[in-house]
Image (cartoon, rainbow, N blue to C red):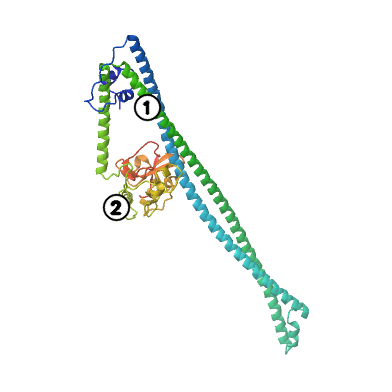
């Protein structure tokens, strides 16, 4: 909020300190605070020295305030990066499950192909043994097996010729059958080789997916540690700033008289009025959102949202299902097509909030539930971003999904309700709630699954 000219002139009448230092200086809670007694009358040199010391402390406060602002910006960036790493860990988990299923199926196929090849080989061995027996017997009797008995058992030349031809035909058929079995064995062996090759490929993909998951988990752990380190640094800066502000207060008390203190009090009261106006405006916005069915963006005790809306293929059915879960806790990794589920451990922020002990949704889990009657969605925002027709944000409409992140790095999703409002499960410590669309880092396209 810009400072009006009168306010800026009022600040200049005090010592050269920021409005933040003035607010800390007084510690006053209302207009009726007692005015402190006037200090002793110091010499000019003492006043000059006191002013120089106060200005020095004010400069330190300003410097620390700037450092803290930069640190808060870094913490926000790290929080967004962690959110992305969590979603990439979700992706790696989904990919690994898919690779494991494919490897299991390839293993079953390879085993079946091996059984068929072994069975074909057994049949060939039996046929080959029968043929050897037939050939040996034929050799012993001169030609085809049974040829001597054919001659001796024939009642006439014509009958003898017929029996000899029959025996020769039987031998030929045995050879044909053996050739057919050998061809079948070749085909089944080829099938076995293809199945084993497919199994090798599936196992390689499974190993790659396991390695990718390990990498994603390690990246997530690194992001968690970086966020913790930055939060600790922010705490140290806050402590330093508070200490210097106390020193500034002491220095200003040393040089300020009654008139200067009253002026600082007026400056503080003006700032307090602006803060109260802003709080009243925010309260009015929250009350308006609550009156329109908003669940709010903060945490707090969970309330029963009531029965779920039935799954359906219409926009209103999707919106109704999402809205039926207002107030349900955020749980990282939670939610499926049937409703809320327990969250899962992430080794960091989600664990700190106890998400693994909460029954609720994360952002992509809420979309899976809302669109259960339309399409089965993967539990990863990156896959959901390419799951339907992408339309420019200028054309987004009720029932579209909105995403945040960057190219290849989508880390959040929400359902657009129309009128600049959306419903989302934003982050650990919050609940499913309705809020205004945020345009910082929003992806350029909305995703439409209906219409």
Pointer 2 with pointer 1, Cβ within 8 A: no
Which mark is on residue 219? none
- In the rendered image, residue 237, in percent from the top left (x then y), is placed at 41, 28
- In the rendered image, residue 444, in percent from the top left (x then y), is placed at 40, 39
Q: Residues within 10 Å of mark 1 (few under 14, many from 20)?
A: some
Which type of secondary structure does the marked residue at label 2 adopt? loop
Q: Is residue 228 left or right of residue 424?
A: right
Residue 210 visible (yes or no)? yes
Query: Can you say which quadrant of the picture contains the N terminus?
Result: top left
Which residue matches tag 2? 306
* Residue at 64% in and 63% down: 186
User: Of residues 427 and 313, which is closer to you in this image?
Assistant: 427
Which type of secondary structure does the marked residue at label 1 adopt? helix
Above or below: residue 238 compared with residue 105: above
Which residue matches tag 1? 242
Sequence-first disc among 2 and 1: 1
Residue 409 visible (yes or no)? no
């Amino acid at each position: 909020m810009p400072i009006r000219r009168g306010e800026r002139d009022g600040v200049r009448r005090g010592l050269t300190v920021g409005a933040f230092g003035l607010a800390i200086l007084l510690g006053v809670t209302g207009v009726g605070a007692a005015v402190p007694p006037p200090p002793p009358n110091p010499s000019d040199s003492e006043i000059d020295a006191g002013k120089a010391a106060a200005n020095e402390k004010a400069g330190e406060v300003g410097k620390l305030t700037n450092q803290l602002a930069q640190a808060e910006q870094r913490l926000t960036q790290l929080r967004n990066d962690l959110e992305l790493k969590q979603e990439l860990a979700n992706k790696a988990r989904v990919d690994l499950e898919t690779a494991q299923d494919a490897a299991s199926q390839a293993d079953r196929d390879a085993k079946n192909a091996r059984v068929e090849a072994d069975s074909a080989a057994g049949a060939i061995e039996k046929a080959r043994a029968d043929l050897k027996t037939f050939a040996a017997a034929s050799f012993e009797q001169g030609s085809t097996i049974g040829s001597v008995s054919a001659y001796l058992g024939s009642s006439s030349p014509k009958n003898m010729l017929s029996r000899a031809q029959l025996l020769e035909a039987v031998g030929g058929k045995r050879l044909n059958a053996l050739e057919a079995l050998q061809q079948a064995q070749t085909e089944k062996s080829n099938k076995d080789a293809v199945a084993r090759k497919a199994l090798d490929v599936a196992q390689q993909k499974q190993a790659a997916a396991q390695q990718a998951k390990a990498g994603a988990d390690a990246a997530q752990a690194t992001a968690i540690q970086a966020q913790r380190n930055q939060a600790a640094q922010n705490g140290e800066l806050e402590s330093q700033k508070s200490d210097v502000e106390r020193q500034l207060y002491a220095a200003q008390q040393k040089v300020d008289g009654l008139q200067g203190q009253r002026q600082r009090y007026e400056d503080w009261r003006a700032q307090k009025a602006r803060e109260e106006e802003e709080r009243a405006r925010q309260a009015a916005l929250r009350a308006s959102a609550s009156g329109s069915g908003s669940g709010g963006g903060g945490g707090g005790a969970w309330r029963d949202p009531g029965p779920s809306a039935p799954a359906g293929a219409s926009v209103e059915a999707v919106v109704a299902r999402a809205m039926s879960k207002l107030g349900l806790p955020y749980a990282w990794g939670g939610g499926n097509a049937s409703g809320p589920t327990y969250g899962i451990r992430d080794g960091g922020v989600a664990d700190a909030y106890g998400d693994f002990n909460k029954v609720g949704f994360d952002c992509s889990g809420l979309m899976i539930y809302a669109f259960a009657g339309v399409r089965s969605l993967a539990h990863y925002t990156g896959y959901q971003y390419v799951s339907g027709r992408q339309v420019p944000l200028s054309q987004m409409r009720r029932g579209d999904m909105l995403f945040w992140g960057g190219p290849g790095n989508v880390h959040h999703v929400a359902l657009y309700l129309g009128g600049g409002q959306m419903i989302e499960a934003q982050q650990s410590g919050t609940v499913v709630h309705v809020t205004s669309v945020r345009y910082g880092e929003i992806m350029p396209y909305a995703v439409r699954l209906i219409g």
